[in-house]
Image (tube, grey):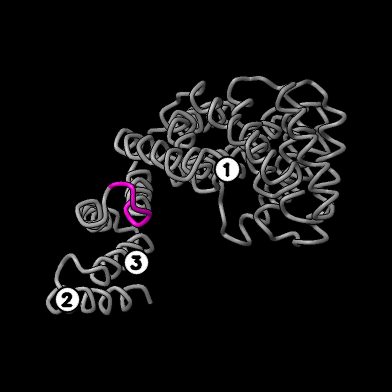
Amino acid sequence: QWEETEKLEVQVMKMRSQILGAEHPNTLTSMENLARTYHRLNQWEQAEKLETQVMEMRTHILGAEHPGTLTSMGNLASTYHKQNQWEEAEKLEVQLMKMRTQILCAEHPNTLTSMENLASTYHKQTWWEEEEKLEVQVMKMRSQILGAEHPNTLISMENLARTCHRHNWWEEAEKLEVQVMEMRTHILGTKHPDTLTSMKDLAHTWKKLGQDDKAIAILQRTVNLQLETMGSDHPDTIDSIGNLARTYHSQNWWEEAEQLEVQVMEMSNTLRVYHWTHSQVWGILARTYHRQNWWKEAEKLWVQVMDMRSRIVGAEHPDTLTSMWNIASTHYMRKQ
C-alpha cells in the first residue's frame, strides 16, 4: 500500500516542482507528505533529505519563527531520533523549544510537546538530570493548565515516575504511580488499558521496595482483569502473567511459578510472538527444572531461550551468551 502511495507522491511532487516551482508552498507540502510516507516505509535517509530541504526552504521563505518552519524542524528532529542521531536531534529540539517558548509562551501545548521530546532525547543520551528537570516542568505546567486529572498530565506523571525508576528513587516513583493509578481508575475505570498499565508499573515499584505482598496482590488483580477484557492470548496479558510468575519465583513459590511459566511458554509458542519478557520467563522455568535436576527439560528450554534472545537482542548480547553457557552447564550435568 505505502509503496503505491510513494509512487503517486513522487509524481505529484515532481509535477508541482516543475509547474509551481521548488519553493512553492504546495510543492513543499508534497515533499512533506512524501517524507511521512518514507517514515512508514522506515526509509529514514530519504525522509531526512526531504525534511532538510523543506526546513531550509521554509526558513528562507517564511522565516525561522514561522509555524510552518517550526513544524519542519520538529519533523526533522523526529527523523534524527529514529536514526539514533541524538546530537542532531538535540540541537534542533533545543532550538525548537526556545523559539516556541518565545513565540507561543512556555505553557503552550506545542512548547510542552517540544520539552517532552527533548526530555526523551536526553533519556537516550543517558542525561538523567536534564531529563528529570524537563519532565518535572512539563508535569507541573500541565497540571496547572489542564488540571491534575487530564490524560496528558497523567502521562507526564507516568514519564517522571519512570525516570525515578532509573535513579532508583522508588519512594518518589511510588507516590506518582499511586496517584496516576487512582485517578485513572476514577476517570477511565479499572478495566481500561491505561489503568492496567498503571497497576503493572506500581507492582514493579512495590517489588523494588520489598513490598512483595502488595506487588503480588495487584499483579494477580491485573492478570484477572486482562484475562477478562483482553483474553489470554493478548501480548499484555502474557507479559503480566510472566511478571507474576517471576514474582512467585522470587518468593520461592516454585509450583505456582512453574504453572504460570508453562502457560507463558505455551501461549508464546501458539501465537509465535516472542518478547524479551517471555525469554526471561522461559529462563526462570529452565532454572526451576535445573533445581529439580530435570536436566533434559532444562537443556531443551535453554536452547529455546538462546534462539529467542539471538533473534531479539543478537547473538553477541551478554544474555544470549549466558544462555549458551547454561546450555553447556546443563549438558555437562546431564552426562554425569
Q: Residue at label 2? A: 20
Is residue 190 a member of the stretch shown in magenta?
A: no
Q: Position of residue 216 (x, y in %)?
A: 83, 35
The answer to whether one can see residue 275 in this image is yes
Q: How crowded is mark 3: few (under 14 residues within 10 Å), some or many (20 or more)?
A: some
Residue under label 1, please give it.
300
Against 71, is 300 above or below?
above
Q: Is mark 3 on a helix, strand or loop?
A: helix
Residue shown at 86%/31% (left/top)? 214
Residue 296 in view here: no
Q: In this view, does 190 lie above or below 153?
A: below
Residue depicted at 59% across the width and 36% down the height: 138
The residues bearing labels 2 and 1 have C-alpha atoms spaced at a distance of: 65 Å
Q: Is residue 251 left or right of residue 20?
A: right
Q: How crowded is mark 1: few (under 14 residues within 10 Å), some or many (20 or more)?
A: some
Mark 3 / mark 1, whichever is N-terminal:
3
Q: Where is residue 21 in the image (x, y as percent from the top left)?
A: 14, 71
- Look at the picture and state if 209 lies above or below 149: above
Judge the density around disc 2: few (<14), some (14-19), many (≥20) Cα neighbours within 10 Å: few
Q: Is mark 1 on a helix, strand or loop?
A: helix
Region in magenta: 64-69
Does 158 sit left or right of 274 as displayed? right
Q: In terms of image quadrants, where is residue 256?
A: top right
Q: Which mark is residue 37?
A: 3
| Residue found 68% across the figure and 52% down from its top | 236
Magenta stretch contains residue 68: yes
* Left-right relation of 205 to 87: right
Residue 238 image label: none
Residue farthest along the left direction in this orientation: 18
Q: Quadrant of the C terminus?
A: top right
Looking at the picture, which amino acid does disc 3 mark? Thr
Q: Nearer the viewer, mark 3 or mark 2?
A: 2
